[in-house]
Image (cartoon, helix red, strand yellow):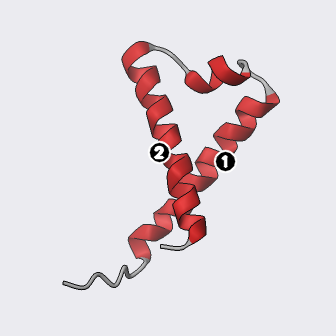
Amino acid sequence: MNVLQKTALVFTIIGAINWGFIGLFNFNLVDSLFGQNSFLSMLIYIVVGIAGLINIMLFFTDLNIKE
């Protein structure tokens, strides 16, 4: 896994945790930290979405796992 994929994975995990908070507690961590409908919140959502698309590539790469 290269640096881009690892960075994208971190952002995807952050997004998943935020969705977990929304589902469990009806609490949006990103909006509460950076303001609802702010440019920074929108930018974070865009970065997390792009990170998710980058992580799709993990399904199509050979991980070369040795037993």
Q: Is residue 26 above or below residue 8?
A: above
Question: Could you say where residue 37 lies in the image, as x and y percent from the top left?
Answer: 74, 22
The residue drawn where x is 52% and y is 51% is: 10
Classify mark 2: helix, strand or loop: helix
The image quarter containing residue 28 is top right
Q: In this view of the protein, which residue sits in the foreground, 34 or 53? A: 34
Residue highlighted by disc 1: 47
For residue 8, which numbered disc appears in the image? none
Query: Relative to residue 63, is residue 58 depicted above or below?
Result: above
Measured as percent of width and height from the top left, residue 32 is found at 64, 17
The residue sitting at 37% across, 79% down in the picture is: 63
Tell me the crowding category of disc 2: few under 14, some 14 to 19, or many 20 or more residues within 10 angstroms, Cα based. Answer: some
Residue drawn at (41%, 14%), measured in percent from left and top? 25
Q: Quick one: SS at disc 1?
A: helix
Q: Give the residue number, with chain letter if any, for mark 2.
A: 13
**Could you classify mark 1 by the number of other residues whose Cα lies within 10 Å: few (under 14), some (14-19), or many (20 or more)?**
some
The residue under the point 74% across, 39% down is 43
**Residue 31's image quarter?**
top right
Q: Foreground mark, 1 or 2?
A: 2
Look at the image and tell me in which quarter the C terminus lies.
bottom left
Instruction: Judge left or right: residue 23 versus residue 27.
Output: left
Sequence-first tag of 1 and 2:
2
Tell me the quarter of the picture where residue 51 sits.
Answer: bottom right
Gap between marks 1 and 2 measured at Cα: 12 Å
- Across and down, in percent, residue 3 comes to 58, 69
Question: Label 1 amino acid?
Answer: Val
Q: Position of residue 23 (x, y in %)?
A: 40, 22
Labels 1 & 2 near each other (Cβ < 8 A): no
Residue lying at the far left in this picture: please name it: 67
Q: Amino acid at mark 2?
A: Ile
Q: Is residue 2 left or right of residue 67?
A: right
